[in-house]
């Protein structure tokens, strides 16, 4: 009999390239200058794109990144997720937006779709995005 994992999400550990700035729930990208390091993703900054996932656990030196499945922000955080709404990496470092027309330069990259208001998103990363 096959067993299904209770948490099928994919996680990966990285060094924290911005200690004190990266918080749980922020969208992160691989650093272009330091190996195995993440920084806050930012749609209009090519050095901070493409995004790879959401910061799930953060310490001063390490970040665990969730790259798929359903991400849930902590109860103390209200990102205002709307069920069924698509979300993109935003132009605010680490943030998301539901309006891709606010991204006037850089990379439009879908990051997920709202699952349950106000804190759950189905992580559905577009690996490449659209250059604008």
Image (cartoon, grey):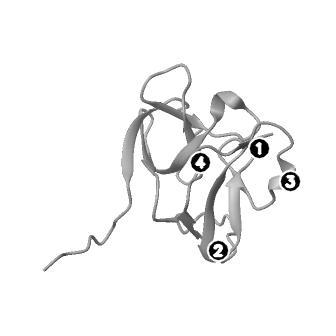
Q: Residue 112 at x, y = what percent?
A: 61, 62
Q: Secondary structure at mark 4?
A: strand
Q: Quadrant of residue 28?
A: top right
Marks 4 and 3 sit apart, C-alpha to C-alpha, by 19 Å
| Residue 20 visible somewhere in the drawing | no
Q: Measure the alpha-carbon separation of dots 3 and 1.
A: 11 Å
> Which is in the foreground here, disc 3 or disc 1?
3
Q: Are marks 1 and 2 in contact (CB under 8 Å)?
A: no
In the image: residue 33, left or right of residue 85: left
Q: Residue at x 64, y 33 (%)?
A: 48
Label 1: which secondary element? loop
**Position in image of residue 33 (x %, y %):** 54, 19
The vertical placement of 95 against 4, above or below, is above
Point out the tag, 3 or 1, that comes first from the N-terminus. Answer: 1
Q: Is residue 23 above or below residue 87?
A: above
Rate crowding at label 4 as few (under 14), some (14 to 19) or many (20 or more) other CA atoms within 10 Å: many
* Residue 42, x across and y down, in percent: 70, 39
At x 64%, y 77%, the residue is 117
Q: Helix, strand or loop at disc 2? A: loop
The foreground one among 128 and 42 is 128
Tell me which label, 4 or 1, sits earlier in the chain. 4
Which residue in the protein does label 2 denote?
118
Mark 1 — residue? 91
Q: Foreground mark, 2 or 4? A: 4
Quadrant in which the C terminus appears? top right
Look at the picture and state if 98 lies above or below 59. below
Q: Which residue is mark 3?
A: 101
Q: Marks 3 and 2: which is nearer the front?
A: 3
């Amino acid at each position: 009999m096959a067993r299904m994992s209770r948490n099928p999400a994919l996680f990966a550990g990285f060094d924290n390239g911005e200690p004190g700035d990266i918080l749980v729930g922020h969208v992160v990208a691989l650093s272009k200058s330091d190996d195995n390091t993440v920084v806050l993703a930012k749609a209009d900054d090519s050095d901070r794109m493409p995004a790879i996932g959401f910061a799930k656990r953060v310490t001063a030196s390490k970040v665990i990144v969730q790259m798929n499945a359903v991400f849930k922000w902590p109860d103390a955080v209200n990102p205002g997720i709307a069920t069924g709404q698509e979300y993109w990496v935003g132009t605010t470092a680490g943030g998301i937006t539901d309006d891709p027309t606010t991204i006037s330069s850089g990379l439009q990259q879908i990051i997920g779709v709202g699952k349950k208001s106000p804190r759950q998103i189905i992580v559905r990363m577009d690996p490449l995005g659209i250059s604008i």
